[in-house]
Each structure stands twice: as C-alpha cells, then as structure tokens.
C-alpha cells in the first residue's frame, strides 16, 4: 500500500466565477483555476420550454504555443529549449503520419487521438466513395488521469 504522501488528492470547488482544481502531490500543491461564465440557452427542440443556465468554460489570454510549452518543460528537465522544441515538432509530424496511415495514437496518462470523417450517405454501395467525405476531424479522448473527477467536487470544502 502506498504511503499517505503518495496519494493524489483532488478537490474541485467554485470560487468567484472559476472552478478551482487542487492537486496535492508529494506535499506540493498545484492549483489550477479554470474560468467560466454562466450563459442562458433555450432548448432548440422545445421552444416553449423555459431557458436554462449552463456553465461555459472560457479561454483567457493567449493560446499556449509550442515555444511556451517547450520553455515550461525546459524548466523541469535537463534538456535544452532547442532539444525540447525539436522533439515536440518531430512528435507532431510522426503523430500526423500515424493518424493518416489509419492508426490511433495513444499517449498513456494523456489520451488517445484518432481520425473520423463526416460524409454524405449514398443510396448504394457503388455510389459510396471518398467524394462523399465532407470533413475529416481529429478526435481526442482524454485518459482518466487527465479528466477531473466531478464526483469529488465537494472535497476540501
């Protein structure tokens, strides 16, 4: 059985229009605030129903770039910024190649990437062809390690 300091403790609670995630790992505390707003929406299938409020996550500031992620990784490793950027760039190229060759890409502890296609239906098998494809999309399914557990949202309150 692991020692108490090896446990990952997760807490989720609301505070001033943000969802606060607290992770306690090996006596270090990491806090991530995910901002959100409350939006009112009508039910498109039942226009007579009263509108309801929903939580909508908000993206703030600039998008994280390969450069900013590589810099953050450099701070916690012995690799240089150039080495990390090279590895990340090559990883994206290799991942794209694997996806386009029909494979899914599983990154343990992060998730699985795969491709899907949206296409128009054909009346017969002979009429079914790649010309019917309207859109190809990259899908991502997060692993359970990445997904926050909403079941423990009241922990630590």
Image: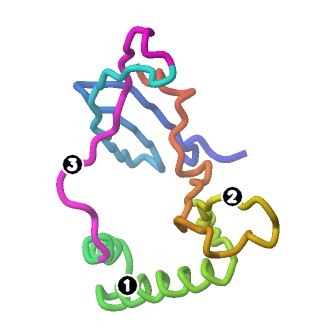
Label 1, on which residue? 84
Position in image of residue 89 (x %, y %): 40, 86
> At 31% from the left edge and 75% from the top edge, which residue is drawn?
66
Task: Label 2: state its secondary structure.
Answer: loop
Residue 60's mark? 3
Task: Label 1: state its secondary structure.
Answer: helix
Please name the predominant secondary structure of the magenta segment in the image.
loop
Q: Is residue 59 magenta?
A: yes
Q: Is residue 137 above or below residue 77?
A: above
50, 92: nearer the viewer: 50
Q: Quadrant of residue 71?
A: bottom left
**Are the residues flagged by discs 1 and 3 in contact, CB closer than 8 Å?**
no
Question: How far apart in space, not on screen, are marks 3 and 2 (Cα)?
Answer: 39 Å
132, 15: nearer the viewer: 132
Q: Quadrant of residue 12?
A: top left
Left or right of 27? Residue 125 is: right
> At 61% from the left edge and 48% from the top edge, which residue is drawn?
144
Position in image of residue 157 (x %, y %): 40, 19
Left or right of 25? Residue 123 is: right
The mark lying in front, picked from 1 and 2, is 2
- The segment highlighted magenta reads 46-66
Label 2, on which residue? 121
Question: How far apart in space, not on screen, are marks 1 and 2 (Cα)?
Answer: 44 Å
Looking at the image, which residue sits at the far right?
125
């Amino acid at each position: 059985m692991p020692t108490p300091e090896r446990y990952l403790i997760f807490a989720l609670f609301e505070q001033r229009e943000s969802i606060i995630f607290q992770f306690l790992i090996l006596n270090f505390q990491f806090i991530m605030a995910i901002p959100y707003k409350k939006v009112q929406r009508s039910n498109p299938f039942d226009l007579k129903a009263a509108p309801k409020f929903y939580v909508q996550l908000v993206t703030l500031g600039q998008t994280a770039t390969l450069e900013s992620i590589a810099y953050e990784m450099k701070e916690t490793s012995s690799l240089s910024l150039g080495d990390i950027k090279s590895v990340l760039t090559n990883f994206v190229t290799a991942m794209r190649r694997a996806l386009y060759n029909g494979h899914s890409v599983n990154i343990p502890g992060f998730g699985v990437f795969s491709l899907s296609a949206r296409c128009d239906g054909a009346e017969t098998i002979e009429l079914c062809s790649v010309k019917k494809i309207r859109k190809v999309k990259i899908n991502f399914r997060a692993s359970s390690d990445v997904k926050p557990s909403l079941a423990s949202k009241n922990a630590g309150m």
